Amino acid sequence: MKLRSLILAASVAALSAATATAEPTKIGMITTLSGGGAGLGIDVRDGFLLALKMSGNSDVEMVIEDDQRKPDIAVQLADRMVQSDKVDILTGIIWSNLAMAVVPSVTAQGKFYLSPNAGPSVLAGKGCHANYFNVSWQNDAMSEAAGNAMSEEGIGKVFLMAPNYPAGKDMMAGFKRFYKGEVVDEVYTKLGQTDYAAEIAQIRASDADQVYFFLPGGMGISFMKQYSGSGVDTPVMGPAFSFDQGILQAVGAAALGVKNTSQWNKDIDNAANAEFVTAFQAEYDRLPSLYASQGFDTANLILSAMGKADVKDADAFRAALEAAEFDSVRGDFAFGPNHHPIQNVYMREVIQEGDVFTNKIIGVALTDHTDAYAADCKM
Amino acid sequence: MSLILLIEQILNGLQFGVMLFLTAAGLTLVFGVMGLINLAHGSLFMVGAFAAATVAGATGSFVLALAASLAAAAAAGALVEILVIRRLYSRDHLDQVLATFALILIFSEGTRWLFGSFPLYLNIPDYLAGPVTLPGGIQYPLYRLTLIAIGLLVAFGLYLLISRTRLGIQIRAGESDREMIAALGVDISKLYTIVFALGAALAGFAGALVGAIQSVQVGMGEPVLILAFVVIVIGGIGSIKGALIGSLLVGLTDTLGGVLLPEFFKLFMDNASATSVGSSLSTMLIYILMAIVLVMKPTGLFGAKA
């Protein structure tokens, strides 16, 4: 009993001490830290925390929780963070279906949400919100870039494949928006599917000149390994999600030479990026992925806005976020009218550096690209 | 759809089915002999894959990796049986589900703690890589053919084990009357440990074989576990023959449904909506199959009369 009252007294004292000084900005991060998609969430979290550490800013208080890639758990966590933890800003969600479950209710309650990864089309268009900012990309962007690149290369027939969920549909819609040739077949697989023998047989039977596929995380690893052993030699291309740093080692030589589109790579030439790549390797002893770069940019955007306005003054803070005056690792970064980025999308190729498989930029696929949904957004 | 494509898809369905059988066989044995629902069976699948990836990384030998997967999964199975499962036989199914669910979490986070959150590298050996040409000009990956052969061999081996050996007699006796074989002087707790380790080894072996063409990562066992439960419900709980037929049925239904349903809807719908309706419906197909089997035969195809 004595001990308990002592702790109580101590925490009351700590509480009053905390309120006496300036109140810290409270950031809630809901991301995937366990299960199959954990690598992505861990990268976003590590990139985010690295930026906070490098800034030396102590006015930030983090609440980090694992959504287990389940929409219902993400919703519970968001409710708890808004109602009992009283966070000012939420961030962290990786998957579009989870973002769709969480973001609308959070922004309706007057909180800010900054997306470090998912960019479902609805939230860029009709469902946009003044308090929702996407720091990564609208889902379609990388596929639009790939569609554009394939058209410019004059590839006539393409086979499309994606999982059957919002981001998969967005990706394929984006590809078709920019691709001028013929889509010979379009296949939607189960989310989390691990065996692609049936789809590979369909690719073999089709007369496609190239395959464009979106299979993030473990799905991409499985597909690439099985594809390389199948004897089908139709070239493949995908967005960066199947070729990010976290999974390339598991795919191995099967991915060598494959082209993929990304808004970031470790060889983008600017001071912020060089500093980020070095610091990330020093801190975590591995190369950063694009997810880590997005977490890093998200944290730096928040820090830049905190420097200009108090988060409690929502209008001023929003204006500070819109200005986006921070050194992005992508180089130039600006928000469009629907709070989604206007940015370059690059074409990368998988290469081997020593023992490590990684990407290098071989060209720009789309310059200062903006998404197709901004016109539907009435803020 | 050409005949060649159809045959290739049937082979794919078979291959998926026999791999499912390796996982489902252990699950159905454990349920049949000990009356235990083991949700952690998928974790043993994962243990096998991780053990194989580690040994393959260290030695470069795929055969050693497979041996390691058998040994590691059997050891993990025996350990779990002695430490945890043994206390659950007399409890009701809810307690078993809760305890084995806890085991899933322990296995997953333990694996993450040991190996990290990023997928491991495990690839098929060079001598099994690449496609072979079958009669009729069908190109099919050699590794998948090997998987079909291995799966059928294991099924045959299990059949011999159950029908021709002393251990098999004890297992069958354990399925029909647990108290009686204990009364007849069979060391029932040793038998249970052996059966559990055997089931675990089969699951781990499947994990290693499949891990070579998939992604070796934490949580890879759970999707397989759900399918394995569907298989043993269709096949009849406790029946190895049922597990084999059920696995092949599920494998073929899932693979062919995913290919043929979108084609079918394309006959009277436009391409995009046919693909989306077809893919959505095909994911439900095995559950529809399970429902139909349960309506016709409530104890499964080869289940004992309730």
Image (cartoon, rainbow, N blue to C red):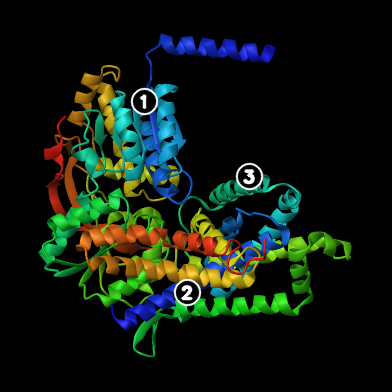
Q: Which mark is residue A57?
A: 1
Q: Residue B193, percent across and down?
A: 75, 61
Q: Residue B121, percent across and down?
A: 46, 63
Q: Amino acid at mark 1?
A: Asn
Few, some or many residues within 10 Å of mark 3 (<14, 14–19, 20+): few
Q: Amino acid at mark 2?
A: Gln
Query: Residue at 57% across / 12% down in the picture?
Result: A10
**Secondary structure of the residue carrying numbered label 3:** helix
Both marks 3 and 2 on one chain: yes
Q: Which residue is mark 3?
A: B98
Q: Which mark is residue B34?
A: none
Residue most extreme to the bottom: B135
CA–CA distance in space, label 3 to label 2: 32 Å
Query: Residue at 23% across / 33% down in the picture?
Result: A326
Asked whether disc 3 touches disc 1, contact meaning CB atoms under 8 Å apart, the reply is: no
**Secondary structure of the residue carrying numbered label 2:** helix
**Chain letter, disc 3 residue:** B
Q: Residue B76, percent across and down?
A: 67, 58
**Secondary structure of the residue carrying numbered label 1:** loop
Quadrant placement of the C terminus of chain B: bottom right
The foreground one among A314 and B261 is B261
Q: Which residue is mark 2?
A: B15
